[in-house]
Amino acid sequence: MIRPNLRSTLGCYTIILPGIVLLLTFVYLPVVWAFSKSLYEFEVGGSARFVGLANYSEYLTLDPTCWPSVANMLMLTMFAVCVRLTLPLIVAKLIHSLPRERWRHFYRVTFLTPIVVPGVAVQLIWQGMIYSDQGMLNSLLRGLDLAGWTHGWLSDPHTALAAVMMVGFPFVGGFEVLIYYAGLSAIPDSVNEAALLEGCTGVSKFFRIDIPLILSQLKLILLLTIIGGMQGFEGLFILTRGGPGFKTTVPGLWMYFNAFSFQRMGYACAIGVLLFLAILTLTLLNLRYFKSAENVKGEA
Amino acid sequence: MGRWKLLTIHVTLIAIASMTLLPLAFMVNNIFRSNHEFYRSFFSVPDAVKGLASVTGSMASGDESPVEVDDQQGQTRRVPPDEAAGMYIQQIKRGPKMAWAVLRPYLINSLVVSLLTALGVCAIGSSTAYILSRYRFMGSRAALMMFIATMMFPGVLTLVPSFLLVKHLGLLNTYWAMILPYMAGGQVFAIFVFHSFFKGLPEDLFESARLDGAGHLRLYWNIVLPLSKPVFSVVIIMNVLGTWNNFLWPFITNTDGSHHVVSSGLFALATSAHAQNFSTMFAAYAISSVPLLILFVYATRPFIRGMTSGALKA
C-alpha cells in the first residue's frame, strides 16, 4: 500500500470514478428511494400523495396476508436451512473421504452439473413434469397402486406449501457441496493425523473435529440461506403465484403484486423496507452468535 | 479404508446423484414424446425412437414390408420403411425445432447482456480493486467500504425503486435496463474477490516497474492482469451464472417483451400457447441449458480450483 503523489492521486480518482458512479446511481439511489417512496401513495406516472407511515401501519395491522405470509416465509426458510446445512455437508464429507482424487473430482463435477439449467426451467420442470396431473409423482403413485393418493400437489391448499418446499429434492446443491468440500480440504493434515492417533474416526470425528473446523463455511451457507429464504419469491411466483388462496404467499411476493399488479408502489416499497429490516436484524444476530461460538472454540 | 465401506460410499453417492439428475433425464426423454404419449404413461421411451429403431433394424435385415406409422394428424398410415424412418425423424425433430425458433432471439439477447455485463464487471471491478488495494489516498478506505457495504442491501429492498429508476431514465425495454444495474451490482462481488487477491501480490513487482516509469495503466496491464487469470475466471463464471439465471428483473423491465432473455423468455413461453406442446417446452428447457453447459465444460477445472482455494469465505 503506497501513498501516491498528487498527479497519480488524480489518476486513482479517475480510475475508480466509473464504478462509484454506477454504484451511486443504481444501488444507493434505489436504496434511498426505497425509504423515501415508502412514505407516499402513488402509481407509476401518477401523482404522489404523502401518507407518512400509513403504508407501514396498513401492512402490519390491516393487511390480511401479512402474518400468514410471514409464517409461510419462516416455514420455507427454516426448512431450507435444515436441508442445506445437512445434506450437502454429508455428501461433501462422503466425497472427501474417498481415497482417489479422480473419483472425488468426478463426484464434485457430477453434483455441480445441474447448475447449468436455468432456475426458471427447474421450477417449470417441477411444475409441469413432476407435480402435474399426469406427472412423475402421480404416475409413480398409480404405479404403486396408490391411485387414491394422487393429487394436484400445487393446487391443493393442504399440500401446496409442502410441494413448494420439496422442489429441488434431494437438495444437494453443487455450490454447497463445493464450499463444504473446500472447508474439509482446508483442515490441516496434522489435525487429521492427531485425530487418527487418538482413535477418533468416522462419525465421532465428523462431529468433534470436522464440524467445528468448518464452522465458517456453515456460517456462510446459513447466512446465504436465511437471506435467500426471506427475500426469495421467484420460485413461488412461477410455481403457484402465491395460491391457492394465500397458502404460499410470502411478503416478497406480496410486494411484487402490489407494485406490478395493483400499482401500489409506495406500499410495495414499505414491504421491501420491512423485509430489509428483518433480514438485517437476523444477519447481525447471526454474525454475533457465530462469532461468540468461534471465540469459545478458540479459548477451549 | 475397507472395501465394503468404500463400496457403500460409492453406492450412496451414486444414489443421491441419480436422484438429483433424474428430473433432467426425464426432461430429455420428454423432448421426443408427444402430448398423447405423455398423458398415456409417464415412464416410457418415446414412440418415435422405438419406431425408428425397429424400422432401421428391419431395413438392415432387408425387410421392405410396409409399417404402420401415426402421421402428424394422428392418423395411422401404412408406408414403406424408408418413408416411415423419415416420419419418425420428423417427429423427433419437431420439439427441438419449434423451441429453437422461439428461443433463438432470447438466446441472442442473453448472450449480449451476459457478455457485456461480464466484460464491464471485469474491467471496472478489477481496475477499481487494483487502485483500492495498492494505493492509500484520501477517501480510498471510504470508497472500499462503500462498495462492500452494499452487500447489506438485499435485492428485495431495491427491486421496486430500481424499476422506478430505470423507468425514469427511459431505459425500459432496452439492453441497458439490464446491463447497467447488473454491472453496478456485480462489480461489488468482483471488487471483493479482486481486492483480496491483489492485496496479496508482492509490492516489489510494482516498485521496480514504477521506477521504470510505468503508469497506472501499464502496471495494471502488464503486471496485474497476467497474474490474476484464475481470479478472473471465478469472477466471470459467478457473474455469468447470476446474469443468466436472473429471471425477475428482465421479466419486469421488458414490459413489451421485445428484449426477453432466456429465463424471462422461458416463463413467457410457459404462459403462451406453446405451453400446450410439452415437447416444445422440454426442448426449450434443454436448449436454454446448453450455453452454460458449454461454459461449464471449459471452465469447471479453474472454477473448482478457484472455489476450493478459498475465494469464498464468510
Image (cartoon, coloured by chain):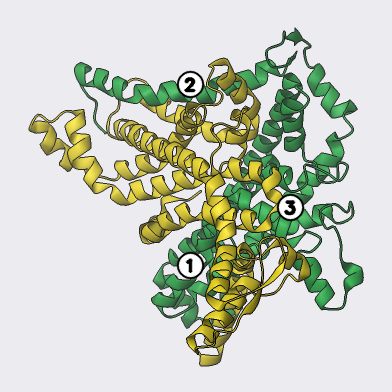
Chain colours: A green, B yellow
Whether A227 is drawn above or below A209: the answer is above
How far apart are the alpha carbons under marks 3 and 2?
Answer: 34 Å
Provide residue B126's location: percent of width, then percent of height.
33, 36
Mark 1: secondary structure: helix
Q: Which mark is residue B308?
A: none
What number is the disc on residue A24?
A: 2
Q: Are marks 2 and 1 on the same chain?
A: yes
Query: In the rendered structure, which disc, 2 or 1, sits on the residue that comes first in sequence?
Result: 2
Residue B33: x %, y % from top left: 65, 65
Type of residue at label 2?
Leu
Q: Nearer the viewer, mark 3 or mark 2?
A: 2
Q: Residues within 10 Å of mark 1 (few under 14, many from 20)?
A: many
The residue lying at 16 percent from left, 42 percent from top is B205
Question: In terms of image quadrants, where is residue A58?
Answer: top right
Q: Measure how far apart labels 3 and 1 are at the Cα level.
A: 26 Å
> Which kind of residue does numbered mark 3 sit on?
Met
* Disc 3 + disc 1, Cβ < 8 Å: no
Give the quadrant of residue A67: top right
Residue in the image at 32% along x and 52% along y: B230
Residue flagged by tag 1: what amino acid is it?
Arg
Helix, strand or loop under label 3: helix
Q: Is residue A295 visible?
A: no
Separation of residues labelled 2 and 1 (CA atoms): 39 Å
Q: Which residue has dot 1 on it?
A: A108
**In the rendered image, residues at marks 3 and 2 fall on the same chain:** yes
A247 on left or right of A94: right
